Amino acid sequence: MTERWLRWIIVAVCLVVVVVAGFSLWASMRLARAQKAFHGSYAQLPPGLSLSERRPANGRALQLEVAAASLGLNWAPKTSERFQAVASLIPEGSRKRWDELRPVFSRWVEENAGALAAARAPLPEEVKAFLAGHANDLATVRELLLQGSLPQWEEDLTQGLAAPIPNLLAGLSVARLLVADAFWRLENRDPATAEQDLLAVRRLGEALVARSELISVLVGTAVNRLAVFSLRSLSRPSREWLSWLEGTDFSRPLERALVAEAAIALRCPKDPEARGLLAHFSPWRRAACAAGAERIVALATALRENPCLGKLDAEALRASVGQAFREGDEIFGSPNLVHALLRVASLNLHAALTWQALAARMGENTPHPGDLTVARGPCRGVVLHVRQEETSWIWSWPGSAPELPKNLQAFRVVWP
């Protein structure tokens, strides 16, 4: 090798070192700016959020795992030693039977929970048979959710992306089972048990949204939505439901979870799949962490300022986080966060509509045709439309949200 070629090689190596060092410095500076911006928006973490506290599972969660096994469900965290122990408790054939029925349960509940009685599809016979055959098992799960403290599964955000979470699919399945059971009870003229089913669903939702991981809060929000939608079918529910609907801002747990997600991103945890040098030196990952955290903070801020769909729309939301946050973008494996915000903002709107109908049903207020401005709660200031059709009153929101699934777009409630 000639001296000239050797000189060129040395120059090339130096250029590569300078470029890599420069990129690494730029990535570190961008991450530092993102951290400063985060602390500017959230100088203090939201109440109930701890990034260092480790919480063990409580006795109620362990009892529910055992009870759910009788239904063919394994509710234990998949990363825990209990997962295999609970799996051994599931009766032979029960898991296969549930796996066969789960799509039927899920589809019926999602399509009919908020439907009017006249438009509601009948419960499939195989669903009724499952509910009848597991009435005692469901009663045990219901009582465990209703009595005493809320279930709490282990939580440890210090593990970052590897933080333990309960089997959320099993938890959502329990909620759908209880909702289906509530409608089955209504068919059999047992409204008291139906209301207890829905109260159990509500408490399960409260337990899940009290967690800090984003995915747990998203599933808990879906569970709360089932409770709000199904509640409309009760003719004379307890008055405490009005207090819950009016006093709950379903967007606050999601904002808290987004803040936690941004804080984890700013710590820039190592990619568990990276090997060798990439596991310790990845400036492009630091840049991605900074970009992800900035977007998440922008979403959390948008949700804090506009928690109700009547004040928040998809285009304004995308504008708040910039053109870089495109349809279908993901951050560290999280689902589409724009849609997540739209769903929770729509839930607050549905809760306001449901409150109006239930309050009239209970004699708390008298409906009048025309426009109605929501006076309290996260949808305060949103205008609803009220009209009468024959003997029924209808409350509706005149806006639209075409990006939401069809079952979330029916922004109206009818009474009686």
Image (cartoon, rainbow, N blue to C red):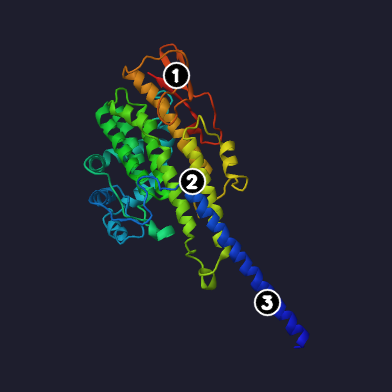
Left/right of residue 375 with respect to residue 130 in the rendered view: right
Tag shown at residue 13: 3
Tell me the quarter of the picture where residue 158 sits.
bottom left
Q: Position of residue 60 (x, y in %)?
A: 24, 48
Image: 214 above or below 28:
above
Q: Nearer the viewer, residue 119 or 85?
A: 85
Tag shown at residue 132: none
Q: Nearer the viewer, residue 22 or 149?
A: 22
| Residue at the image position 69 percent from the left and 73 percent from the top | 15
Looking at the rendered structure, the secondary structure element under dot 1 is strand
Q: Nearer the viewer, residue 88 or 67?
A: 67
Type of amino acid under label 2: Ser
Q: Which residue is mark 2?
A: 41
Left/right of residue 151 with respect to residue 213 in the rendered view: left
Q: CA distance from mark 1 to mark 3?
A: 73 Å
Q: CA distance from mark 1 to mark 2?
A: 40 Å
Q: Quadrant of the C terminus?
A: top left
Give the mark nearest the N terminus, 1 or 3.
Answer: 3
Image: 76 above or below 308:
below
Q: Position of residue 23 (x, y in %)?
A: 62, 65
Tell me the quarter of the picture where residue 319 sits.
top right
| Residue at the image position 21 percent from the left and 42 percent from the top | 148
Q: Position of residue 137 (x, y in %)?
A: 24, 43
Type of amino acid under label 3: Val
Q: Are marks 1 and 3 in contact (CB under 8 Å)?
A: no
Label 3 Cα neighbours within 10 Å, binned few <14 / some 14-19 / many ≥20? few
Q: Which residue is mark 1?
A: 394
Give the mark nearest the N terminus, 1 or 2.
Answer: 2
Left/right of residue 195 with respect to residue 291 in the rendered view: left
